Image (spheres, rainbow, N blue to C red):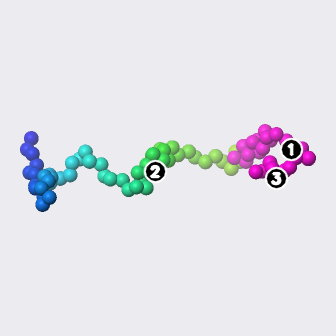
Amino acid sequence: MPQLPLQVKQDGLCDTDTPSPTKKAKLTAMKEIFQDEDDVMGTHVERPLPVRLRIQQEILKFKCMPKLKSTDDVIAFWQ
């Protein structure tokens, strides 16, 4: 297999005419930080639930919560 000609740069280092295919493109700092989250977000997409079903779930969630007595502090419940 023929080898690519090497070129000597002014700094004395050798380089080939084409970049190595094994080198990956350098990511920006933001892409590097959020790469894992982007991969997860891109592969896991669910259809939103219908409005009627979401309403029923919310109602059931609040019905399952313990009841407040009239003597309890209602504001403390929402904190």
First to last magenta residue range: 54-79
Sequence-wise, the earlier of marks 2 and 1 is: 2
Residue 61 x, y percent position in the rendering: 75, 42
Residue 42 visible: no
- Measuring 68% from the left and 50% from the top, which residue is drawn there? 51
Label 1 and label 3: CA atoms lie apart by: 11 Å
Q: Residues within 10 Å of mark 3 (few under 14, many from 20)?
A: few
- Label 2 and label 1: CA atoms lie apart by 43 Å
Q: Tell me if residue 74 is in the magenta stretch.
A: yes
Q: Residues within 10 Å of mark 1 (few under 14, many from 20)?
A: few
> Which labelled disc corresponds to residue 34?
2
Residue furthest to the bottom? 10
Please state which of residues 28 and 9 is positioned toward the viewer in this rendering.
9
Front label number (3 vs 2) = 3
Q: CA distance from mark 3 to mark 2?
A: 38 Å
Tell me which label, 3 or 2, sits earlier in the chain. Answer: 2
SS at badge 1? loop
**What amino acid does circle 1 point to?**
Leu
The residue drawn where x is 36% and y is 53% is 27
Measuring 72% from the left and 43% from the top, which residue is drawn there? Answer: 57
Q: Name the secondary structure under disc 3.
A: helix
Q: How would you classify the magenta stretch by its main secondary structure?
A: helix
| Element carrying mark 2 | helix
Name the kind of residue labelled 3 in the image: Ile
Closer to the chain start, of discs 1 and 3, is 1
The residue labelled by disc 1 is 68
Q: In screen coordinates, is 34 left or right of 53?
A: left
Residue 22 is a magenta residue = no
Mark 3 sits on what residue?
A: 75
- Left or right, residue 14 beside residue 64: left
Residue 25, horizontal then vertical, whole percent: 31, 52
Instruction: Give the amino acid type for the residue marked by disc 2 in the picture.
Output: Phe
